[in-house]
Amino acid sequence: MTAYKRVLLKLSGEVFGGGRVGVDPVVVEGIAREIADVVRSGVEVAVVVGGGNFFRGAELQKSGMDRARADYMGMLGTVMNCLALQDFLEKQGVETRVQTAIAMGQVAEPYIPRRAMRHLAKGRVVIFGAGAGMPYFSTDTVAAQRALEIGAQVILMGKQGVDGVYDSDPHRNPNAVKFDHLTYDEFLQRGLQVADATSVSLSRDNNMNMIVFNLSEEGNIARVIAGEKIGTTVSR
Ligand code: UDP
C-alpha cells in the first residue's frame, strides 16, 4: 500500500549533475529506476526538474548578465535535464511526456494541465520543464504550483546528500539539528534555504504538504511514497 496516489516529485539540478555541471548518467539512471518502480506499483508521478547543474540566473547576474536573460538560460537548462530523465525512464519501459512552460514543439509538449492529468491517469510520467516560463521564479515555486494545479497530494523535494531540513547547514556545522516536522511559518521565520520562500508560502496558503528527503539513498522515493517517516515534513 502506498500513502499517496498522485505525487509531485521535485528534482533539483544538483541531483542530475551529481554535484557537477552537466548530467551524470549513472545518477539519472538510478533515479529513473526508482521512479519506474513506484509507477509500476500504481502511483501517478509528475516531476518538476531544476536546472542548477547548468545555470542559475542569480549567479549569472553576479557576473554581469541581465537577470531576465540569465533566468531564461536557467529555464532552458532544466529542459536538458528533462530530456535526460525522459530517456532513462523510457529505457525502463515507462511512458513519459515532457511538458515545457516555454514552447519548443520538437522536444516537448506545451504545458497543458488537463492533458498532463490525462497522461498521469494513463500511467505516464509527466516531466515539467522550463520552470514557470517566467524570470525571477524558481523551480521550487513551480513544483508547488504544478502540484496544486494537477491535484497532487504532496510535494516530494528530493535532495542530493542531505536527509531533510536542518537548523543550519549540516555539511558545515557538525552540530546542526534536523527537524522531523516544521510548520510553514516556522520554516519561513527561520529563513531556511532548502526550499525557496515563495514555494513555501504558496504551499501554506493552499495547504499543500511538502516532504524534503534524501535522494542519494537508494529506495527513498518508494519509502517516502509508502508513507515511511523519512526526511522533514513541512505542513500546518
Ligand atoms: N528559472 C526561472 N523561472 C522559473 C524557474 C527557473 O527564471 O520559473 C531559472 C532561474 O534562473 C533558476 C534556474 O532557472 O536559477 C534554474 O532553476 P532552479 O534554480 O530552480 O533549479 P534547482 O535549484 O532546482 O536546480
Image (tube, rainbow, N blue to C red):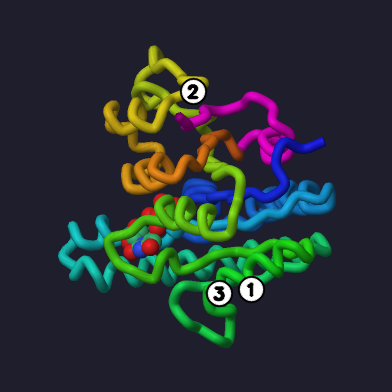
- x and y percentages locating residue 138 in the rendered image: 37, 56
How packed mark 3 is, by other alpha carbons closer than 10 Å (few <14, some 14-19, many 20 or more), is few
- Disc 1 marks which residue? 115
Which residue lies under the disc numbered 2?
181
* Residue 222 within the segment the image draws in magenta: yes
Q: Residue at x 52, y 27 (%)?
A: 232
Residue situated in front as seen by the camera: 136 or 12: 136
> Which residue is most to the bottom?
106
What's drawn in magenta, residue-wise?
A: 216-236
* Element type at mark 2: strand
Across and down, in percent, residue 180 comes to 51, 21
**Image quarter where ligand 1 lies:** bottom left
Sort mark 2 into few (<14), some (14-19) or many (20+) by Cα contacts within 10 Å.
Answer: some
Which residue type carries mark 2? His
Q: Secondary structure at mark 1?
A: helix
Q: Measure the C-alpha gap from mark 2 to mark 3.
A: 34 Å
Q: Quadrant of the N terminus?
A: top right
Position of the C terminus by quadrant: top left
Instruction: Indicate the quadrant where residue 214 lies.
Output: top right
Amino acid of disc 3 = Ile
- Out of 32 and 151, give the one closest to the viewer: 151
